[in-house]
Amino acid sequence: MKISYYPGCTLKTKAKNLDIAAVASLEALGVEVEEIDRWNCCGAVHSLTADDLIHQVGPVRNLIRAKEMGAEKLITLCSMCYNTLARANQIMKTDPVKRDTINRFMDEEIDYNGEVEVVHYLSFLKEAIGWEKLKQQVKVPLTGLKIGSYYGCTLQRPAEVGIEPFGHFELMNDMFRSLGATVMGFADADKCCGSYQVLSSAPGENSASANIINTAAGQGIEALATSCPLCEFNLGKQQQQMLDKGNIEQNVPTYYFSQLLAVALGLDSELCHFELNDRQSLTLLENKNYLVAA
Amino acid sequence: MTLPISDQSLSLSSIAEINTLSGENVKVCMQCATCTGMCPMAQEMDFSPRKVMHFAQFGLIDKLLEINTFWKCASCHACSVKCPRGIDIAKVMEALRQQTLRKSKNHIEPSQMAKETITELPQIALVAGFRKFTS
């Protein structure tokens, strides 16, 4: 099986730990991952003003690249890329006036009418592999890991592009159950981490992120999993500063879901690039003795 | 808080402009404050999303331009999905940001950001932040 893949900018540098672990995991599960040619930035946020079409050009261009390669589906990992690509695709599928304007503006490109389906990695994992088969492939069960699946905003909102309905976190929860982890209830699973507000607040001073970490710790969660590099930055990389400033009471190590998937599949831990996470993230996995395969 | 409303403070054109930019109708809001209850950034805002919707309904554009609410909005759509009147409030906040940004006024100055901060931040934070805070 072969699938087209859009990585996005951050996944090639600061979130290599999200990208490489995910691609290696799919390959270990027998899926060939093909990165689309000449992809560009997705724009990171969907334009919310009614008259702004120029910011749809970036994401649509990526969808055209996928169409040119004959892809029916395009998988993404980063939650923000997923959201911008899926929402631009929705415009191209459902709004003939905007579609026509965008197609005519990009007259050097082939016409695009929403032919490619944008699919998040987690949805693809369920659909193409399935939880039972995944369970059989687990080499290092994450036994005893009290995990909280953190979706944030862009995987679920708005409903038209959500990977599952509000209040449901089954895709990531079921994946972790298949990997042998203990999935914990998490009241803040779809609360926003503050997103790009990191640009307007001092390090460690983001109240939205601090509230999420405090809720997780209060609910007995010992590890948080996300699919978004900005959530990981706000919740993970800023954690020490939140602790130093007294805004959170204790650390909750933060991971990309793909890193824990790769660990459970027994892949070399170097593929997970734990050096890009907080040091405490690796320490927890070492203490739990999950890195035996490396 | 008392806000005097007169023919000077009430701008009908600003109501129309917010509605056009957002594609929403602010007059539909019934002031239930569900948006405020859902907002993860409310504690950092000087006026809650409900109050901002009220200012917008009365066209109090001068007041709207001096508050921080829409600059603190993270566009997470938590308000939009729960609004019982079906208003996409995140789009109203975007319209309010755009009213300033489209006058070539930046909310943050990228050139003033510390080099270390720029080096440290993931690309999506910079792209998203500059899209929301600069013209």
Image: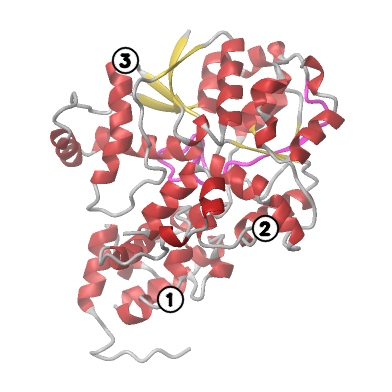
Identify the chain of the residue marked 3, using the numbered disc in the image: A
Query: Quadrant of the rendered structure where residue A49 is?
Result: bottom left
CB atoms of marks 1 and 2 within 8 Å: no
How far apart marks 1 and 2 lie (CA) works out to 24 Å
Question: Does dot 1 land on a helix, a strand or a loop?
Answer: loop
Segment tinted magenta in the rendering: A141-165
Return the residue at label 1.
Answer: B67
Question: Does dot 3 land on a helix, a strand or a loop?
Answer: loop
Question: Per the image, is A143 magenta?
Answer: yes
Residue kind at label 1, given as amino acid type: Ile
How far apart marks 1 and 3 lie (CA) works out to 48 Å
* Residue A69, label in figure: 3
* Residue A211, label in figure: 2
The location of residue B93, given as percent across then percent down, is: 38, 63
Observer-nearest residue: B134 or A85?
B134
Q: A155 above or below A140?
A: below
Query: Quadrant of the rendered structure where residue B97 is?
Result: bottom left
CB atoms of marks 2 and 3 within 8 Å: no
Identify the chain of the residue marked 2, using the numbered disc in the image: A
